[in-house]
């Protein structure tokens, strides 16, 4: 059975980031992150596989972007990492804009 992520709201994500060991991963481009962000670390979607080791020590992993499209792709990719089968992956549905 394939591991799955859970959709959460922006407010739930921000609450979760207060939990020790958690990380908020913003998968927008660097310029977008610099312009406005909700905290966490910036790993653009194109770089998520090569920078995966930066997240190895975190659990849960919460993925966010502008409207939820790129972060959904990243969350699905993170769910495929066999070494991360025990990690909890969250996706911020609707992203920062959360319409």
Image (cartoon, rainbow, N blue to C red):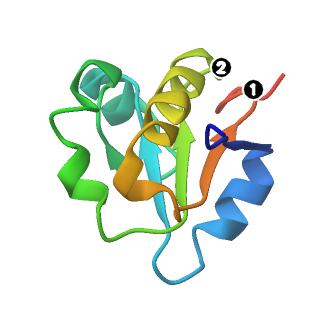
**For the point 18% across and 41% down, which residue is it?**
51
What residue occupies the far right of the structure in this picture? 99
Name the residue beneath numbered marker 2.
67
User: Do labels 1 and 2 touch, CB within 8 Å?
Assistant: yes
Q: CA distance from mark 1 to mark 2?
A: 5 Å
| Residue 70 position within the rendered picture, expressed as x and y whole percent measured from the top left | 51, 18
**For the point 31% across and 34% down, which residue is it?**
34
| Residue 83 position within the rendered picture, expressed as x and y whole percent measured from the top left | 35, 56
| Sooner in the amino-acid sequence: mark 1 or mark 2 | 2
Number of residues whose C-alpha sits closer than 10 Å to that of mark 1, classed few (under 14), some (14–19) or many (20 or more): many
| Residue 48 position within the rendered picture, expressed as x and y whole percent measured from the top left | 28, 32
In the rendered view, does 1 fall on the left or right side of 38?
right
Name the residue beneath numbered marker 1.
94
What residue occupies the far bottom of the structure in this picture? 20
Mark 1, secondary structure of its residue: loop
**For the point 80% across and 45% down, which residue is it?**
9
Number of residues whose C-alpha sits closer than 10 Å to that of mark 2, classed few (under 14), some (14–19) or many (20 or more): some
Q: Nearer the viewer, residue 31 or 9?
A: 9
Q: Is residue 69 above or below residue 13?
A: above
């Amino acid at each position: 059975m394939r591991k799955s992520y859970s959709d959460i709201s922006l407010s739930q994500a921000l609450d979760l980031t207060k939990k020790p060991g958690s990380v908020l991963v913003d998968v927008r481009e660097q310029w977008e992150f610099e312009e406005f962000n909700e905290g966490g670390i910036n790993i653009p979607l194109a770089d998520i596989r090569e920078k995966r080791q930066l997240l190895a020590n975190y659990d849960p992993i919460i993925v966010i972007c502008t409207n939820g499209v790129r972060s959904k792709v990243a969350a699905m990719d993170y769910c495929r990492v066999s070494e991360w089968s025990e990690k909890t992956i969250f996706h911020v549905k609707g992203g920062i804009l959360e319409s």
